[in-house]
Amino acid sequence: MAACKAALDVITEAGFEKMRKKSALLLSYLEFLVNEINASQPEGKKFEFLTPKEASVYVPKGIQPGCQFSIAQEEEKNYLMLW
């Protein structure tokens, strides 16, 4: 119980909006890195983004996707989900 309270204290002190902003920045950076890797990979070896972006068919306009990020590598059948 003490660990849960300590975690909640950190969230309360930092503020949810600041944590959400940092999460979005980190996900943007991860997306940038994947795009950089894809630039040097042949077709079939590139990663595909599975997580929908804001204002996509799966995410209504004005709604931000959560903090989960999924990618797949089609040819190798590798799947990766990050939180």
Image (cartoon, grey):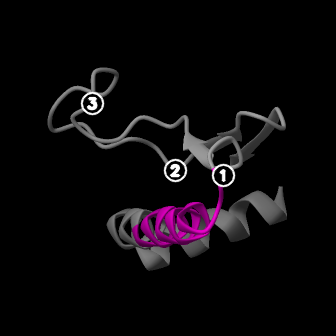
Task: Find the distance from the CA under tag 2 to the CA under tag 1.
Answer: 6 Å
Circle 2 sits on which residue?
A: 67
Q: Which residues are magenta?
A: 25-42
Left or right of residue 47: residue 53: left
Mark 2 vs mark 1: which is more N-terminal?
Answer: 2
Asked whether the residues under the numbered discs 2 and 1 touch, taking CB atoms below 8 Å apart as contact, a structural biologist would say yes
Residue with the mark numbered 1:
83
Task: Please name the amino acid that badge 1 sits on.
Answer: Trp
- Percent x, y for residue 3? 82, 64
In the rendered image, residue 20 lying in the magenta stretch gets the answer no
Using residue 78 as the reference point, say whether residue 52 is left or right of it: left
Residue 56, disc = 3
Kindly identify the residue that appears in the image at 57 percent across and 41 percent down: 48
Residue 69 in view = no
Q: Secondary structure at mark 2?
A: loop
Q: Amino acid at mark 2?
A: Cys
For the residues marked 1 and 3, what is the alpha-carbon distance in whole angstroms?
Answer: 20 Å
- The relative height of residue 66 versus residue 23 in the rendered view (above or below) is above
Closer to viewer: mark 1 or mark 3 = 3
Q: Main secondary structure of the magenta part?
A: helix
Amino acid identity at mark 3: Ser
**Does the magenta portion include 28?**
yes
Q: Marks 3 and 2, Cα distance to the nearest angstrom?
A: 16 Å
The numbered mark, 1 or 3, whose residue comes first in the sequence reads: 3
- For mark 1, give the secondary structure: loop
N-terminal label among 3 and 2: 3
Tell me what residue is drawn at x 70 percent, y 63 percent: 5
Seen in the image, is 61 located left or right of residue 52?
Answer: left
Q: What is the count of numbered marks? A: 3
